[in-house]
Image (cartoon, rainbow, N blue to C red):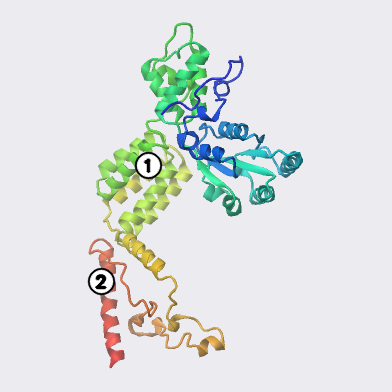
């Protein structure tokens, strides 16, 4: 993949590299080919001659602001930019009024809103009328998942365009363009150059900022190695990119080691994730997931211990709290394993989706009104606590569905005891049914 910024603008002293290397045409933004390539989503929209409101979702430094500005230029729209961090209702009203006046004179406005997820619900709702009547074409930029951070009403009126982190090849190419702009090579050896690419973490702006720091710090003829680079920029190179394959590979290896009851391998991958700078609370959340997916009711304490470890880390912080997560990890790896609840839940969800319109049997429904009593609600319901063994053996499934079996506990761990209870209740249910038939 090529670099994000294909051609540098005219050099101007004092301007940051990231600004000087902004492309002057949408076709030159090649870090997001799925959007701006010859057959990209944005390219198609421009060819159609009609833009709609959009949400640009993606990590920092991937070109969202640049693309919005170039979109306006390619379509002849006036470009207005605001930031949700610094703007309030008064600012929005002023921008909307300017856009209305501009539209009255025959020109539409592309309103770019940076960090749009920081607007509250009422502020987000204020965009709806001006989007609907065509006063503005909204392009909002966010690093957060729009499904969680933006109002459904706003999302229903805008198309989400996903921006991707720049791959290492793109960052490397971007550094080459920076060297052409500066007229001098970076003062880095090959290893240090590779480290700088990893430090950027898919962020083109960050890569250029780091490059500028290296140029400023270097004496005449000085070349930094990897250790020297990390020293001058005061930043440690990540062992893996948290948004790329390394992140997912290690969490996958940790999960499978726990599932495979190997505490040593589990600790190894846990330690690698800590060493790579992974968010410990993310690790804590994954351990909780392992507890419910792979241990389940074979050891009900697993979930309790994982939640306690997550809270302990939140209380102690790093590095003391990491030991609590390590303890939970070892507990999970050495616990009896069962995915019986996990598979039962998936089966129940499938059945619920396929039979979601079936009414529960009337005998288990409450009858708060005379009409409902007359309709048979609650009739013949047996209160289990009043029955022998506190078990009535009634059928609770919809009549049209019949009894279903989703949960089948294995004969290990605490689920061995649950299996005994279920077998006993199944025996009682058959006996009660036989008595009722007689």
* Disc 2 crowd, CA 10 A, few/some/many (<14, 14-19, 20+): few
- In the picture of the structure, the residue carrying the numbered disc 1 is 323
Of badges 1 and 2, nearer the viewer stands 2
Q: Which residue sits at x=55%, y=83%?
A: 368
- Position of 276 with respect to 128 (left or right) is left
Q: Nearer the viewer, residue 133 or 66?
A: 133
* Direction front: furthest residue: 48
- In the picture of the structure, the residue carrying the numbered disc 2 is 420
* Direction bottom: furthest residue: 438
Q: Does residue 175 sit above or below 242 in this rendering?
A: above
- Marks 1/2: CA distance? 37 Å
Q: Which residue sits at x=57%, y=52%?
A: 156
* Disc 1 crowd, CA 10 A, few/some/many (<14, 14-19, 20+): some
The x, y position of residue 132, in whole percent, is 66, 50
Location of residue 224 by image quarter: top left
Check disc 1 and report its element: helix, strand or loop.
helix
Q: Which residue sits at x=47%, y=33%?
A: 37
């Amino acid at each position: 993949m090529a670099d994000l910024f294909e051609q540098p603008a005219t050099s101007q002293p004092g301007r940051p590299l990231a600004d000087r290397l902004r492309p002057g045409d949408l076709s030159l933004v090649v870090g997001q080919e799925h959007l701006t390539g010859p057959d990209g989503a944005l390219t198609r929209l421009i060819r159609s001659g009609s833009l709609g409101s959009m949400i640009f979702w993606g990590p920092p430094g991937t070109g969202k602001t640049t693309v919005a500005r170039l979109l306006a230029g390619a379509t002849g729209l006036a470009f207005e930019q605001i930031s949700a961090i610094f703007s309030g209702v008064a600012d929005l009203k002023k921008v909307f009024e300017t856009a209305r006046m501009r539209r009255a004179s025959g020109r539409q406005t592309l309103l770019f809103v940076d960090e749009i997820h920081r607007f509250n619900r009422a502020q987000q709702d204020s965009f709806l009328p001006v989007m609907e009547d065509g006063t503005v074409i909204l392009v909002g930029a966010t690093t957060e998942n729009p499904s969680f951070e933006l109002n459904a009403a706003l999302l229903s009126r805008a198309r989400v365009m996903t921006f991707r982190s720049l791959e290492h090849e793109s960052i490397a190419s971007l550094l080459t363009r920076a060297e052409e702009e500066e007229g001098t090579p970076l003062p880095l050896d090959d290893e240090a150059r590779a480290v700088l690419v990893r430090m950027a973490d898919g962020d083109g702006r960050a890569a250029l900022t780091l490059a500028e720091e290296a140029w400023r710090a270097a004496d005449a003829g000085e070349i930094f190695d990897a250790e020297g680079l990390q020293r001058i920029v005061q930043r440690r190179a990540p062992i893996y990119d948290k948004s790329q394959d390394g992140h997912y590979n290690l969490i996958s290896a940790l999960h499978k080691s726990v599932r495979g009851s190997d505490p040593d391998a589990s600790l190894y991958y846990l330690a690698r994730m800590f060493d790579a700078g992974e968010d410990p609370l993310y690790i804590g959340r994954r351990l909780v997931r392992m507890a419910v997916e792979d241990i389940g009711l074979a050891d009900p304490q697993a979930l309790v211990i994982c939640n306690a470890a997550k809270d302990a880390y939140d209380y102690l912080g790093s590095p003391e709290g990491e030991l609590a997560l390590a303890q939970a990890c070892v507990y999970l790896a050495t616990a009896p394993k069962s995915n019986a609840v996990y598979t039962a839940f998936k089966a129940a969800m499938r059945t619920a989706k396929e039979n979601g319109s079936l009414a529960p049997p009337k005998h288990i429904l409450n009858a708060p009104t005379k009409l409902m009593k007359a309709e048979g609600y609650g009739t013949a319901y047996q209160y289990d606590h009043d029955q022998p063994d506190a078990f009535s053996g009634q059928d609770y499934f919809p009549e049209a569905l019949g009894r279903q079996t989703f949960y089948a506990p294995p004969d290990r761990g605490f689920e061995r005891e649950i299996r005994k209870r279920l077998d006993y209740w199944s025996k009682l249910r058959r006996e009660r049914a036989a008595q009722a038939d007689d």
